[in-house]
Image: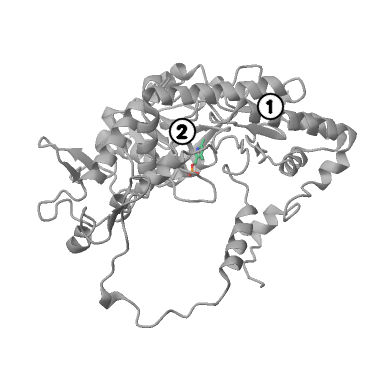
């Protein structure tokens, strides 16, 4: 291992600096590791292979090709510079079992510093005492968080049986609470989509382990009664859990830790610069307040007095390992690069624009689309397509119409408490021209619903596949290949 690494040191074989100024190492394998004869590969002209993959990639809708206003999931532009940072060989060539010290060289110190610094920055953003970067998805963060809740209550000798979750929550919230061994009590939303406070008070008792809340909630509305809710939960020694999967609306402006929350997770792959969709690697760091610190998973990265970083395991109250090694390091690295790139001011400005863009769309669509609330929204806005039912048009038809016009549909039929829901999150990086184009198309579709509903029933006509039966496709999966 030592030898391979030495080859990556300036001046040694394989080392070069590319045209962009990045250090690289050309593959440099020992002759004994090389093939004796060429591999038997199918013979195809290069052009054909390039065309095949290029055409396949063009069947995709992505943030790199189309406006993608998917609400509740923050599909935003992720700076390509962050991709570049995590392809630096100093990171890609690291192996997780490398010793923290090897022959006196601080080989993994840079990676440990990235983990340490990212953890500090996320703690600052969330107002928490400490974070773990290990969970590998938002839902994994929720599981970590609910396990920490359970560990805290066991430690306190509390007998707790349930976690309270509003009906507008992301489906992973009740799933995580259940996996951590709790019953779930669901609180219905009132007519404005807000958690019903009377129902909440009625549900809380000495057996309440805590409450999981998304704020701004799934309707894109900031819950102004957070302090009151925290008081109700804390009165029975319950813990307040903040689902911060989409922090776009508040990052740099206010902190869950200051709103009365005791623990929270973030989705680095939604808010902090990792492309998501397609199920690809994620990261769901969990932050906790001081009194929950002992229960965080191991390992943790600590900064020693001599200025070096070390992995630390000796935490008797820890919930233990939640992920192999250090979580998804590459995703953490992108977040680190993103945070340094934007800085405190940039993070704040990003949330300003996220909220401004969503309100712009909400204001421009309101004359034609029925909004679910009269309030200003945060980073996303929700409409109902129910009034179009009288023309035989459903939200699904509008979504398919958008596809034909080169726009990825927003989130539809979610949140569940809104009939025919249309949930739009433009994100901070979209220009006014793009937003205006989107609004124009939405208005055109509303007109078509009345004048030519048949056209919308047939959409999409411009795609490689038309209307799919998504439920049947998921339930009766057929993965055979026919050439
Ligand atoms: C996406 C999301 C989650 C789950 O995150 P995953 O990484 O998909 O597991 C949880 N809560 C909210 C509000 C989300 O938007």
The mark total stands at 2
Residue at the image point whose x is 55% and y is 23% from the top: 355
Q: Is residue 141 left or right of residue 354?
A: left
| Residue drawn at point x = 34 percent, y = 39 percent | 148
Q: Earlier in the sequence, mark 2 or mark 1?
A: 2
Residue in the picture at 63% in, 53% down: 58
Provide the residue designation for mark 2: 243
Task: From the viewer's perspective, tell me whether residue 295 is left or right of residue 348.
Answer: left
Task: Please indicate, yes or no, whether residue 187 appears anywhere in the rendered image.
Answer: yes
Pinpoint residue 17: horizontal percent, then vertical percent: 31, 50
Report the residue marked by disc 1.
Answer: 436
Horizontal and vertical percent for residue 344? 37, 24
Q: Residues within 10 Å of mark 2 (few under 14, many from 20)?
A: many
Which quadrant of the figure has residue 167?
top right
Is the CB–ligand 1 distance for label 2 below 8 Å?
Answer: yes
- Above or below 266: residue 221: above
Q: In the rendering, at what x and y percent does residue 350 appear?
A: 48, 26
């Amino acid at each position: 291992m030592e030898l391979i690494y030495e080859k990556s040191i300036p001046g040694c074989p394989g080392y070069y600096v590319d045209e962009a100024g990045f250090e690289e190492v050309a593959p440099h394998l020992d002759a004994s590791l090389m093939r004796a004869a060429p591999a038997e590969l199918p013979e195809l002209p290069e052009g054909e292979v390039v065309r095949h993959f290029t055409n396949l990639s063009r069947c995709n809708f992505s943030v790199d090709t189309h406006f993608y206003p998917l609400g509740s999931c923050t599909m935003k532009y992720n700076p390509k510079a962050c991709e570049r940072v995590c392809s630096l060989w100093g990171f890609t060539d690291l192996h997780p079992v490398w010793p923290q010290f090897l022959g006196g060289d601080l080989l993994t110190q840079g990676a440990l510093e990235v983990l340490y610094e990212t953890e500090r920055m996320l703690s600052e953003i969330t107002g928490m005492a400490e974070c773990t970067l290990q969970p590998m998805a938002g839902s994994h963060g929720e599981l970590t968080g609910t396990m920490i809740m359970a560990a805290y209550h066991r430690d306190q000798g509390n007998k707790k049986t349930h976690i309270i979750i509003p009906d507008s929550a992301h489906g992973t919230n009740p799933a995580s609470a259940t996996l951590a061994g709790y019953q779930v009590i669901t609180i219905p939303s009132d007519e404005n989509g807000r958690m019903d406070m009377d129902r909440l008070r009625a549900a809380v008792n000495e057996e309440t382990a805590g409450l999981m809340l998304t704020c701004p909630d799934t309707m894109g509305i900031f819950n102004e009664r957070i302090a009151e809710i925290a008081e109700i939960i804390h009165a029975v020694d319950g813990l307040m859990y903040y689902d911060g999967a989409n922090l776009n609306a508040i990052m740099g402006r206010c902190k869950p830790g200051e709103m009365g929350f005791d623990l929270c997770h973030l989705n680095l792959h939604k808010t902090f610069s990792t492309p998501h969709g397609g199920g690809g690697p994620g990261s769901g760091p969990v932050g906790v307040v001081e009194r929950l610190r002992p229960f965080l998973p191991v390992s943790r990265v600590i900064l020693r007095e001599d200025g070096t970083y070390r992995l630390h395991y000796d935490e008797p109250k820890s919930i233990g390992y939640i992920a192999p090694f250090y979580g998804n390091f590459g995703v953490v690295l992108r977040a680190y690069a993103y945070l340094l790139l934007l800085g405190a001011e940039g993070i704040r400005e990003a949330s300003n624009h996220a909220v401004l863009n969503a309100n712009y769309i909400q204001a421009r669509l309101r004359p034609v689309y029925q909004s679910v609330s009269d309030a200003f929204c945060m980073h996303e806005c929700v409409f109902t397509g129910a009034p179009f039912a009288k023309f035989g048009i459903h939200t699904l038809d509008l979504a398919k119409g958008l596809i034909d016009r080169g726009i990825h549909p927003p989130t539809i039929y979610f949140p569940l408490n809104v009939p025919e829901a249309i949930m739009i999150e433009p994100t901070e990086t979209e220009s006014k021209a793009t937003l205006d184009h989107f609004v124009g198309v939405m208005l055109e579709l509303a007109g078509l619903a009345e004048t030519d509903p048949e056209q919308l029933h047939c959409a999409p006509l411009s795609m490689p596949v038309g209307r799919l039966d998504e439920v049947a496709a998921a339930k009766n999966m057929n993965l055979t290949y026919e050439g």
